[in-house]
Amino acid sequence: MLVCALDMRKKADKARSSQLTGGEGFTYEDVVAAYFLAALLREEAALGQPGYVARVAVQQNRQGEPMDDVIVDSEAAGERNRLSVQVKRSVTISKANDDFNQIIANAVATRAKTEFRPSLDRYGFIARAVTDGRFQSLLRIIDRAKASPTGAEFANRFRPASESSKEDIVLRDELRTLIHPADADAEADFYRHFVAHRLDGFEPGGDRFADLSNRLGAISANGEGPGLAEILCRQVRIGEGAAKVWTRPSLIADLRSLHALVVAPSYVEDIRIVVELARDAVADIRSDIGGVTIPRDGLVERAEQTATANVFSNISGLPGCGKSAPLQVASDVVATTY
């Protein structure tokens, strides 16, 4: 009966909500995952992660991930960091709440994995709504763990007449019965890797949805940020059923036939430099022979067709046969078209 009740609760939590993304019917989890996909697409940082997002996965429980809703990998200083989170529309921080119990149990299981990397990997939850008083107490417990180099110092912060309030002490004692730490060092270490984020404002007209739309509009060929946000949400919903994993190349491939994109902000300067180098190189090419210009329309057309059909194209031939002239004409066409 308990398993059945939890399953029904989980299904209710994932029920479609017309309050998100213009009534399309995406869940809060869909929109949060789309938020991380936007960071992946723009190759930038996202909430709770250092560096830039390099990989996003959803529903990875069958791949051995206890915190399975959304898993985000980021690259920073040559290291790969991982954030594994449960996503909930609402969280009540209490031992009596089944959802919160499951979050803590999954966090403990994630921390216990042999491949877990201390200081690089994190786990926790993202919620649209959280009971405020206890949420602030939880955040203070996390901050005190990070500020304490040892478990003993962490425990001292919760002694009577210490810096911790009575509410913080009560919550810490309650959570210890869920975490079951071996000692104060293990308890402090658990909190150092735990993240708790309240992420609201994703409803149409909300500040975070507006920011998401603006960021996506900057890489949309037609500036249609809300439309691209909706496409990302739809990709998440489809991907959830297949335990989808995205990298930036695979995400771009998924979007290729759905929405035209422009260069991501992180590559704008690089592309500008490449364009300048290409223009300088083409400017040195002569298309005439002693003042006589020979039409090469057929060769130019073939060059354009080949370049359109392939990622990389090469014009080859003997020296002096006229390889550069069609390249110059084709580049002039591209420069005036784009």
Image (cartoon, rainbow, N blue to C red):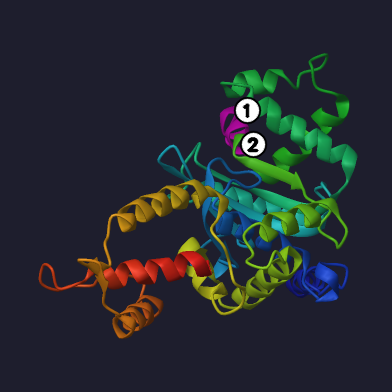
Q: Residue furthest front?
A: 291
Q: Nearer the viewer, mark 2 or mark 1?
A: 1
Q: Residues within 10 Å of mark 2 (few under 14, many from 20)?
A: many
Report if residue 27 lies within the magenta region. Answer: no
Residue 227's tag is none
Residue 150 vs 221, above or below: the answer is: above
Name the residue: 54% across, 71% down: 244
Q: Where residue 272 appears, x then y in whole percent?
A: 47, 50
Q: Is residue 81 visible?
A: no
Mark before the other along the chain sequence, 2 or 1: 1
Residue located beneath label 1 in the image: 146
As measured in the structure, the alpha-carbon distance from the residue carrying label 2 to the one carrying label 1 is 8 Å
Q: Where residue 60 appears, x then y in whole percent?
A: 56, 66
Residue 56 vs 297, above or below: the answer is: above
Q: Is residue 196 left or right of residue 333?
A: right
Report if residue 182 lies within the magenta region. Answer: yes
Task: Tell me if label 2 and label 1 are in contact, CB under 8 Å.
Answer: yes
Q: Which residues make up the magenta segment?
A: 181-190
Q: Residues within 10 Å of mark 1 (few under 14, many from 20)?
A: some
Q: Residue furthest left?
A: 318
Residue 252 vs 218, above or below: the answer is: below
Name the residue: 75% across, 35% down: 139
Amino acid type of disc 1? Answer: Lys
Q: Quadrant of residue 138?
A: top right
Residue located beneath label 2 in the image: 191
Amino acid type of disc 2? Answer: Tyr
Q: Quadrant of residue 20?
A: bottom right
